[in-house]
Structures are given as structure tokens and as C-alpha cells.
Image (cartoon, rainbow, N blue to C red):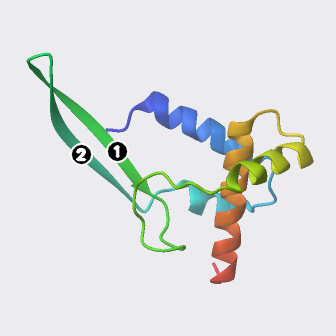
């Protein structure tokens, strides 16, 4: 089961960022709902004790390329987020980053006719 606090926090950030876009409600719902969620449990030995951790990965779309994890570094990413923050009078970087991501996803969906 997904951690409810994390889900609520993510949905709050999504809604905040969405308010700075022109994305339609039906497309917003499509972006918000994941296609699949994977759960992984793994053990780690720390200080002679084995601890079990649970991780989750939700895949919302495969429109850019096959979904895969990991951090991506883009030298222009921060610039795009800062520019969006200034141009849209967004109060913080996290909301601006969500807005940039939502706009990119919406543009991609539009390009394939969704």
C-alpha cells in the first residue's frame, strides 16, 4: 500500500503546479493516474541487523521513451524552472519544476493526438 502522506504531498504539489498551466481537467487526470506501480522489498544489513525496506515506482506514461528509473541531469533544467518561476510568479522552485514537467508531458501527449 502506498504511503498516504507521500501520496497526499505529491497530489498537493501536482495541484499547485497545475494551477499555473492551461492543461484541461481530463488531461490532468490522465497525467495524474499512473499506468502501473511497482513495489520492491529489499534487505540491507546495518550494524549486524537485517532491515527490510520497501520502495515504489509509479509509471505514469511511456510517451517519451520506455520508462526507466534514475536521475537525469540536464544543464538547462534549472534555467527552465527558474524562468517558469519568474514568468508565472510561482512562489517556489518545487512547484515551478512540477509545472515545467506537466507542460512537457501535456505537449508530448498533444503531439501524439491524446
Q: Residue at the far front: name it.
A: 75
Q: What is the quadrant of residue 29 in the picture? A: bottom right
Taking depth in this image into account, of 54 and 80 the one nearest to the observer is: 80
* Vertical side of 64 occupied by 111: above or below: below
Where does label 1 land, which residue?
Answer: 56
Residue at 68% in and 81% down: 111
Q: Where residue 41 sits in the image (x, y, percent)?
A: 20, 40
Identify the residue shown where x is 69% and y is 46%.
97
- Residues at discs 1 and 2 in contact (Cβ within 8 Å): yes
Please tell me whether mark 2 sits on a helix, a strand or a loop.
strand
- Residue 54 lies left or right of residue 70; in this view the side is left
Q: Position of residue 27 (x, y in %)?
A: 66, 64
Say whether residue 29 is left or right of residue 21. Answer: left
Q: Position of residue 39 (x, y in %)?
A: 27, 47
Please tell me the numbered disc located at residue 40.
2
Q: Reply above or below: 36 against 42.
A: below
Q: Residues within 10 Å of mark 2 (few under 14, many from 20)?
A: few
Q: Alpha-carbon distance for marks 1 and 2?
A: 6 Å
Residue 7 visible in the picture: yes
Q: Nearer the viewer, residue 112 or 52?
A: 52
Image quarter where the C terminus lies is bottom right
**Can residue 16 be seen at all in this image of the molecule?**
no
Q: Is residue 99 left or right of residue 51?
A: right
Amino acid at each position: 500500500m502506498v504511503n498516504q502522506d507521500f501520496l497526499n504531498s505529491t497530489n498537493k504539489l501536482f495541484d499547485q503546479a497545475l494551477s499555473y498551466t492551461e492543461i484541461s481537467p481530463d488531461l490532468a487526470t490522465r497525467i495524474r493516474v499512473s499506468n502501473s506501480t511497482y513495489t520492491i522489498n529489499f534487505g540491507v544489513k546495518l550494524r549486524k541487523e537485517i532491515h527490510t525496506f520497501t520502495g515504489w515506482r509509479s509509471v505514469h506514461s511511456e510517451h517519451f521513451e520506455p520508462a526507466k528509473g534514475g536521475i537525469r541531469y540536464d544543464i538547462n533544467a534549472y534555467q527552465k524552472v527558474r524562468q517558469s518561476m519568474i514568468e508565472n510568479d510561482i512562489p517556489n522552485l518545487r512547484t515551478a519544476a512540477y509545472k515545467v514537467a506537466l507542460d512537457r508531458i501535456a505537449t508530448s501527449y498533444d503531439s501524439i493526438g491524446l
